[in-house]
Amino acid sequence: MIRATTSKQTGNVRAQAANCIFQVVDKGRSLSDVLPQAQLALENPKDKALLQTMCYGVLRWLPKLDFCCSRLLEKPLKGKQRPFTFLLYVGFYQLLEMRIPPHAAISETVEAALAMKALGLKGLINGVLRNFQRQQDDLIAAAEKVDSCRYGHPNWFIKQVKEHYPDHWQSILEANQKQAPMWIRVNQQQFSCFDYLAQMAEVEITGTEHDTLDQAIKLDKPVDVFKLPGFEEGSCAVQDGAAQFAAQLMDVQPGDNVLDACAAPGGKTCHMLEIQSELAAMTAIDSDANRLTKVQENLTRLQLTAKLIAADAGDLDSWWDGELFDRILLDAPCSATGVIRRHPDIKWLRRAEDINQLADIQQQILNRLWSTLKPGGTLVYATCSVLPEENKQQMIRFLSTCPDAQLEPIHHDTPENPGWQLLPGINDMDGFYYCRLLKLGAT
């Protein structure tokens, strides 16, 4: 019997990688779910890192690897044999992109077929990998003529990016394919960036401050968070620079009653509390009770307090007590197409038809939360998407149908072109969108 998984006893990294990618592409599971589970079967930290590298790499370049595979197999592997297609991708990726000697890459990948209980496919795997090694220059040259292979994205997404960003669509796709840097947010209740950089230097960790974000540092090299000085005592948190603008734009004030809707994993909730310790109340809502556990862990580590509610933010009857909020952050459910460089599985989990469905959900939540905002209050709408259907077009529609909503410009935005779109890779940050709205009426 052919099995797509490997046991803890075998611990074969390549078999684990093939299974993870199979679970993402064919089963629609998030890599954030399947990868940590697979790493539990590996004891060596280097094996855990190797597994992550292979999974991320294959998912970044899936169309190109699939193109090559389709030309080397006489017929597709289907049914119980399907997971071994992904094992071939893992082998191709090692030969193309990793510093593993070719003979070792091939032999270890063939051994992974044995770990996956596929004795009958050992010869096929070996033959296809050796043919790829011999023909790879010609195969890659042919693949590069196909946009999805050249840029590593599905065709529907390439088409949308070309349409919306005709002058720099290529740079967006190329930025998505690069490994994201590690950003941290210094807890300003404990340290300034200057002081924390000095502490980092003492343990030979280096980084650079952001020009306009007071607490943001981009590390020169990623590190284990527990090597960061005082991390367990709440000295800092991991958060991309683009995401750190949310708290800055919220500009929470003493005595404010604040809502963070769709709050997990809690980075923005914690950031606002770090900035302003004299809030009347901070409420953080998320529909996933399990993800709220992470919010509480972050709050506890950073020595902060907030009211956590597991609920659908748009279902007011299930959670709202009728007290109006001074400020609302709506980090809306979205396609996450601005953070593909951190989560390459997004490209294969999203479909073109998802975008309009997400836009409808965003509109419903926005309309309902607006009724919970005080006159004179501020709502910041945010997504980690680059698609205008979820961002600018969403805000144009809302402003045109909501007479008591007024745009509060961030960077020269206007009602005809509302909000601030950050594109992936600009200043080495993720893609994000922000729009700030003021509710008219007596305060």
Image (cartoon, helix red, strand yellow):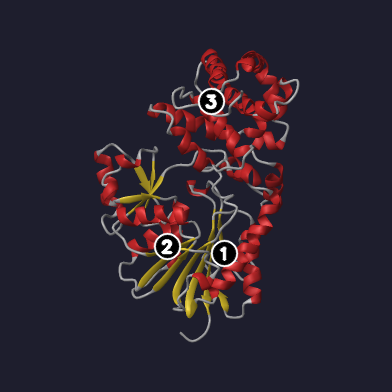
**Where 353 falls versus 434 (above or below)?**
above
| Quadrant of the image occupied by residue 358 | bottom right
Q: Amino acid at mark 2?
A: Ala
Please identify the residue farthest to the right as the structure is shown: 74
Residue situated in front as seen by the camera: 93 or 20 = 20
> Looking at the image, can residue 60 be seen?
no
Question: Please, what secondary structure does the residue beneath circle 3 have?
Answer: helix
> Looking at the image, can residue 333 be seen?
yes
Query: Mark 1 or mark 3, which is nearer the start of the sequence?
Result: 3
Residue 419: give its label. Answer: 1
Cα separation between marks 1 and 2: 16 Å
Query: Mark 2 or mark 3, which is nearer the start of the sequence?
Result: 3
Residue corresponding to mark 3: 15
Cα separation between marks 3 and 2: 42 Å
Please identify the residue farthest to the bottom as the structure is shown: 442
Q: Is residue 80 left or right of residue 321?
A: right
Q: Position of residue 179 (x, y in %)?
A: 50, 38
